[in-house]
Amino acid sequence: MGRYLIPLVLFIVLVVFLAIGLGRDPHEVPSPLINKPAPAFHLAELKDPSKSFSAEEMRGRVWLLNVWASWCVSCRDEHPLLLEYARTGVIPIYGLNYKDRPEDALAWLGELGDPYVLSVSDLDGRVAIDYGVYGAPETYLIDQQGVIRFKQIGPVTPDVWTKTILPLAQELNRQGSR
Amino acid sequence: MSSLQIWFSLCVFGVLCVTAVGLLEILTKTTETQRSQRLHRGVLLLAVLLLLSVGSVASAQIRQPESNEPVDPVVEQRLTKLSQELRCLVCQNETLADSRADLAEDLRREIREQIRAGKSDQEIIDFLTQRYGEFILYRPPVKPKTYLLWFGPFVLLLLGLVILFSYVRRRRDLISDQPLSNADRRRAEELLGTASRKETA
């Protein structure tokens, strides 16, 4: 009896480790930018390239920066949800149009609707590198002090929205208004 | 931090253990001729495994830059060397040097520009880890959080050696030599029907 106990315990430990490993998404790399200041950028607006927008302008507000592109399949999945959340008006959503052709991006918004207060064009993907983007869509929740508080890699799901993003944004807004 | 490396070490360790135990079995359990035959097979298996593991180390080539800019061989060489140490975040088991992903091309462009701007390798690596985390490093830094990763396989190897050693010792004790008594010998000869040619005391 005793001689089987050690292999059995080892086996159970192995199974537990493998089970944890299976449950994790290896593609999700924790961002080192959480709780760090959001990198500054200054980019031309998608709809009116003569105007520009910088992250600085959002000081004092809680906002979402959503990285998207017309070539990104998951962005299409995520899009109806963003439209719905934008309609609630709780958090303003800004778009970072990542390595896209502006005409494609505009056509995409025209076809599917535009959830963004505005989108900026990151044509060569440099700002995305500053934000540690490695797969669109990605979404950053940025607080009043310009600090990244949360990052969603991949599409925002209803679960993430109701359990994480919304409560966190409401909490930040409460703190900010005090 | 890559748990993949831990598992890989575990697998290699497991295969080595099984082979070692197998060789041990062969050495202790079989007759002389069987022994040499099976020993040959064991050694052959071990050699094949070693060859396979050597064969999996792929060689990387210097890639031409994506743009039509003039190529500076010094910069390209540094870029290749540096990007072989860095992970492509899109296809995570490829280095930045090997990857064809868009992001990898962008990051190579970034590194190339920083090399031209006179940044040191460490500065470039810091730039990337600040944005993508230590996951981007194929050679994770040695620090308390990665001790298990770096030293775990050696601890396991040591543990395996201890277990192997005690196992071998226990077996050696089990098969202690018991000299044949004269009565036993006579009985054996009777059963075998052979007359004893040389009588020993």
Image (cartoon, coloured by chain):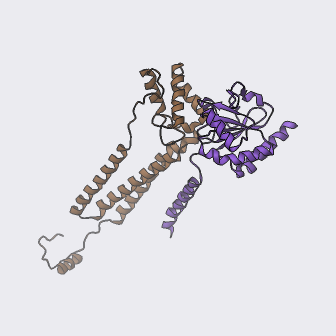
Image mark count:
0
- Chain A: drawing colour: purple
Q: Is residue B141 above or below residue B42?
A: above
Q: Give the quarter of the image for residue A176.
A: top right
Report the front residue among B146 and B194. B146
Q: Quadrant of residue B55?
A: top left
Give the chain letter for brown: B
Percent across and percent down for residue A76 are 64, 46
From the viewer's perspective, is B155 left or right of A138?
left
Residue drawn at the location 52% of the way across and 64% of the way down? A8
Front residue of B197 and A42: A42
**Residue B48 higher or lower than A144, as above or below:** below
The x, y position of residue B43, in whole percent, is 28, 53
The answer to whether residue A82 shows anywhere in this view is yes
Q: Is residue A32 at all visible to an observer of this figure? A: no
Q: Is residue A102 left or right of residue B155?
A: right
**x and y percent of residue B143 in the render?**
57, 37
Residue A27 at what x, y percent from top left? Answer: 57, 46
Near-viewer residue (A96 or A161): A96
Residue at (78, 37) in percent of width and height: A62
Residue A102 lies left or right of residue A159; in this view the side is: left
Residue drawn at the location 59% of the way across and 45% of the way down: A73
Look at the image and tell me in which quarter the C terminus of chain A lies.
top right
Which residue is at 54% across, 41% downward?
B90
Q: Which residue sits furthest right? A: A178
